[in-house]
Image: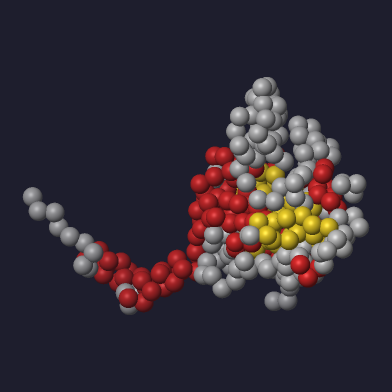
């Protein structure tokens, strides 16, 4: 059956979108609806899964299959869905609290298993749904209702954690940069394996302007560097700055003062060590890398490996399903407990 021609409106529901006016989630929702028609799948092939938090309302607003699951368990549920039906296109949309606090272990294990799904982290560095407590990604010293003297915690580094966990596609983008988000999201959804996208998302009520240094035209050209495979890391409003590696560590240099483009670091998205270097580059000392930071192809996915075992087990037990069950019950895998 030929694929229907979709538009973004085909992925919208009749539900009222209930986020705070001005929330960055609106931009992400719009961008995802625009991207899906480009991916070449039927609408009923998509499943959006969320946990708890502001971002967790996402499945209500997508005219696809979807589940709003319990706190921190979105990736466990998504893994089960993928195992039950490997043909489905799974996208988990969640926040920094859901994915890195109560759901932290599930995030690590989904990545190391290379489950074939996409994770969108809408990172606003705050617990917005519960009105402004500091979250796992809040900066140390963050003053909130739950930390009036400043958070004593050091924050989780989502990119570093993804690198260390063996995630096979790691990317970062920004909610208001629709063009960049579109390119990154399409790439992530097309990836075979676990793809993780950190989205700098503005919570304009409880943590407004947290990422403005990376999103506003007055500052973003000096505060971010767009990485593209095979191209040197150049940034700045006048494209006169770059990143050079010295003894394995990044260094900001100015082009033209004894430094040429040939001296700059060239992005290699297949280099996991380089992805870790990127994860340590933080504003204001460095521009923060955005784009596809790491991509690995050819690694078997968890769902593929599980289904290979299921197929092999069936092959070992020829005959009907009932006969296979009989073989299992009466075969060498059973034993009698002597009285």
In the rendering, at what x and y percent does residue 25 appear?
Answer: 77, 45
Numbered disc total? 0
Horizontally, residue 260 falls left or right of residue 123, namely right
Task: Return the x and y of residue 32 as percentages of the image width and height.
Answer: 76, 56
Q: Observer-nearest residue: 242 or 54? A: 242
Q: In this view, does 153 lie above or below 316?
A: above
> Is residue 300 rendered to the left or right of residue 133?
left
Task: Give the residue at the far front of this rendering.
Answer: 258
Residue 297 on image: x %, y %: 60, 71
Residue occupying the point 84% across, 51% down: 222
At a point 87% along the width and 63% down the height, the residue shown is 256
Which residue is nearer to you in this view: 329 or 29?
29
Color scheme of the displayed model: secondary structure
Q: In which quarter of the image is the N terminus?
A: bottom right
Left or right: 156 in relation to 237:
left
- The residue positioned farthest toward the top in the image shown: 148
Task: Residue 4 in the image: state x and y as whole percent.
Answer: 76, 70
The image quadrant of residue 333 is bottom left
Look at 70% across and 51% down and name the residue there. Answer: 281
Whether residue 304 is visible, yes or no, is yes
Task: Specify whether 122 is left or right of 237.
Answer: left
Q: Which of 296 and 29 is in front in this view?
A: 296
Is residue 35 visible in the rendered structure shown here?
no
Give the farthest residue toward the left. 339
User: In this orientation, which residue lies closer to the viewer: 64 or 20?
Assistant: 20
Q: Which residue is drawn at 13% across and 54% down?
A: 337
Answer above or below: position of 47 versus 123. below
């Amino acid at each position: 059956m030929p694929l229907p021609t979709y538009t973004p409106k085909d992925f919208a529901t009749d539900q009222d979108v209930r986020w705070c006016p001005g929330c960055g989630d609106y931009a992400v929702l719009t961008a995802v609806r625009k991207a899906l028609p480009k991916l070449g799948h039927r609408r009923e092939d998509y499943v959006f899964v969320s946990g708890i938090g502001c971002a967790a309302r996402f499945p209500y607003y997508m005219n696809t299959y979807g589940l709003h699951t319990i706190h921190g368990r979105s990736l466990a549920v998504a893994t089960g869905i993928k195992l039950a039906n490997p043909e489905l296109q799974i996208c988990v949309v969640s926040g920094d609290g859901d994915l890195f606090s109560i759901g932290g272990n599930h995030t690590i294990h989904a990545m190391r298993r290379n489950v074939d799904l996409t994770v969108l982290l809408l990172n606003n560095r705050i617990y917005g749904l519960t009105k402004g407590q500091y979250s796992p990604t809040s900066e140390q010293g963050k003053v909130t209702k739950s930390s009036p003297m400043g958070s004593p915690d050091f924050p989780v580094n989502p990119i570093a954690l993804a690198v260390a966990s063996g995630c096979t596609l790691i990317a970062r983008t920004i909610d208001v940069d629709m063009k960049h988000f579109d390119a990154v999201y399409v790439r992530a959804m097309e990836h075979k394996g676990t793809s993780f996208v950190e989205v700098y998302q503005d919570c304009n009520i409880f943590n407004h302007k947290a990422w403005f240094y990376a999103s506003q035209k007055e500052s973003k050209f000096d505060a971010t560097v767009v990485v593209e495979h095979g191209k040197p890391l150049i940034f700045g409003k006048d494209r006169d700055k770059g990143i050079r590696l010295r003894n394995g560590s990044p260094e900001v240099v100015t082009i033209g003062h004894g430094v040429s483009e040939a001296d700059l670091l060239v992005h290699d998205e297949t280099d996991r060590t380089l992805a870790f270097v990127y994860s340590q580059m933080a504003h204001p000392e460095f521009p923060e890398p955005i784009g596809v930071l790491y991509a690995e192809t050819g690694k078997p996915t968890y769902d593929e490996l599980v289904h290979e075992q299921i197929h092999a087990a069936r092959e070992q037990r020829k005959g009907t399903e009932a006969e296979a069950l009989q073989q299992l019950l009466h075969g060498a895998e059973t034993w009698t407990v002597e009285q």
